[in-house]
Image (cartoon, rainbow, N blue to C red):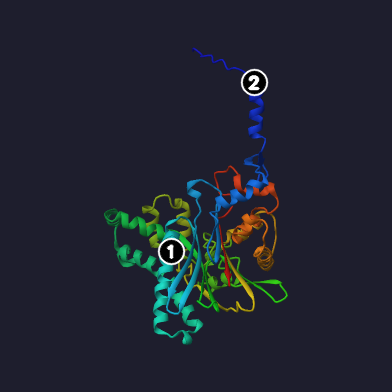
């Protein structure tokens, strides 16, 4: 065997110093997991942190809402699955303001569909209502019904597309060869339908009337809305508006168990619906709302890169009396008085609160809400720290990723890791004036 010998010239002292200079600001962490594995991150100077966070979170501000949406992991499969809407609608009686966060899971198709379709459905339905009912006779429950119906209609459209493509009676009668031929013949259509049915999205939206006397909050899932108000004395107080739809909410777990036979112990398992999904209410996730034959015969064999076969069998065996995921939202109405109190509304996906937990900051839901409103309230009229003050959502995000802890903020922004080290985070801060 012949070996080729390569002679390498020794680095000069200057080159050695340059190499050391390039890596001096890099550190490693085990993320508190223990073990030998370490991940690298870059220590950023304080002067660069806000600019980098602003860039990575796509921080934007409109006349009435500040927004950020954040996922530092750059791997394609882990791109941010949150979406949001900020819209103003010129309707009979004036301009209505619509804001929403859609927290997608298991993929981008369903959340993209919801993001595209829901605002237009709400706007059209609201316009019809306002044309038929005088503003003086508009009752809050009328608007609540419009919002609830719009969300359920959208979910029904996803389910209807599946049932029109593959009716239950036909599916049960088809041979495997016939089913395969049917799907191959309309594969592009099947690809769209199956993706929306095996992925999902939560929804948290706010709708305010032209005079800012009323705000409606609709929730379907595990995002959170907090209303902040400042009293005459200047003290801010926080009110959590919605309940959270996941299995950690005991009322949700009890509701699911009531809706299914006592023998179905796995309908809530390991704080997840059927041991699979954390949110208990969502758009999409149709495979958990229809008979298990769709999972076993349609989705599992004819959907690439879905669940491993052993998991399909496990979950399908638990689908006995669907639906298990609800599409029934909860709608809350609040009367506002912006002439007497300064008001703000914070909408956030569940990743914001999760990040505090990841950073070992243990707070109750109310303590968390108080912290957010207090932080925003202190800076809503501040003339200092203009980079953060100009976007109140960015102020909240900076607090969550580490606040004044430069090392923790740097780690959360620059960690070199292929897997997600935090959930997607989207924050909207709406100011009522």
Left or right of 146 on screen, residue 69: right
Q: Position of residue 251 (x, y in %)?
A: 59, 72
The quarter of the displayed image where residue 423 is located: bottom right
Q: Is residue 250 above or below residue 186?
A: below
Frontmost of labels 2 and 1 is 2
Q: Is residue 295 visible?
A: no
Q: Residue at x 58, y 58 (%)?
A: 351
Residue sitting nearer the eye, 229 or 297: 229
Q: Is residue 176 above or below residue 238?
A: above
Dot 2: element: loop
Residue 41, image quadrant? top right
Q: Earlier in the sequence, mark 2 or mark 1?
A: 2
* Relative image position of residue 398 (x, y in whole percent): 64, 55
Which disc is residue 12 wearing?
2
Question: Which residue occupies 60% across, 73% down?
Answer: 241
Q: Which residue is denoted by mark 1 in the rendering?
A: 114
- Residue 131 is at least partly visible in this image: yes
What is the CA distance from the residue labelled 2 to the residue labelled 1?
59 Å
- The circle drawn on residue 388 is none
How many other residues sit within 10 Å of disc 2, few (<14), some (14-19) or many (≥20)? few
């Amino acid at each position: 065997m012949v070996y080729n010998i390569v002679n390498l010239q020794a680095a000069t002292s200057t080159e050695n110093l340059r190499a050391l200079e390039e890596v001096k600001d890099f550190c490693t962490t085990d993320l508190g997991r223990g073990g030998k594995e370490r991940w690298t991150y870059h220590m950023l100077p304080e002067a660069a942190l806000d600019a980098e966070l602003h860039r990575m979170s796509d921080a934007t501000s409109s006349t009435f809402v500040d927004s950020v949406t954040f996922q530092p992991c750059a791997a394609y499969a882990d791109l941010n699955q949150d979406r949001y809407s900020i819209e103003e609608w010129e309707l009979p009686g004036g301009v209505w303001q619509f804001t929403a966060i859609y927290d997608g899971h298991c993929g981008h198709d369903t959340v993209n569909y919801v993001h595209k379709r829901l605002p237009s459905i709400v706007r059209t339905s609201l316009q019809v209502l306002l044309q038929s009912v005088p503003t003086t006779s508009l009752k809050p429950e009328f608007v609540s019904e419009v919002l609830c119906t719009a969300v359920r209609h959208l979910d029904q459209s996803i389910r209807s597309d599946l049932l029109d493509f593959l009716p239950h009676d036909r599916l049960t009668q088809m041979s495997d060869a016939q089913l395969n031929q049917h799907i191959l013949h309309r594969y592009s259509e099947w690809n769209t339908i199956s993706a929306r049915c095996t992925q999902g999205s939560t929804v948290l939206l706010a709708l305010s009337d032209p005079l800012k006397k009323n705000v409606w909050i609709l929730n379907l899932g595990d995002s959170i809305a907090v209303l902040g108000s400042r009293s005459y004395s200047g003290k801010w107080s926080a009110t959590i508006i919605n309940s959270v739809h996941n299995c950690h909410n005991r009322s949700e777990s009890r509701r699911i168990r009531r809706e299914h036979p006592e023998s179905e112990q796995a309908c809530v398992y390991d704080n997840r619906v059927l041991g699979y999904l954390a949110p208990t209410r969502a758009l999409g996730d149709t495979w958990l709302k229809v008979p298990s034959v769709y999972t076993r015969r349609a989705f599992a064999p004819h959907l690439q890169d879905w669940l491993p076969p052993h998991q399909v069998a496990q979950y399908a065996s638990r689908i006995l009396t669907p639906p298990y995921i609800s599409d029934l939202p909860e709608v809350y109405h609040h009367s506002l008085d912006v002439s007497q109190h300064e008001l703000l509304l914070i909408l956030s996906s569940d990743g914001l609160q999760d990040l505090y937990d990841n950073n070992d900051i243990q707070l109750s839901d109310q303590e968390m809400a108080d912290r957010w409103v207090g932080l925003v309230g202190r800076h809503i009229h501040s003339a200092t720290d203009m980079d953060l003050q100009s976007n109140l959502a960015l102020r909240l995000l900076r607090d969550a990723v580490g606040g004044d802890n430069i090392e923790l903020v740097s780690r959360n922004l620059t960690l070199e890791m292929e897997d997600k080290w935090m959930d997607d985070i989207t924050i909207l801060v709406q100011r009522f004036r």
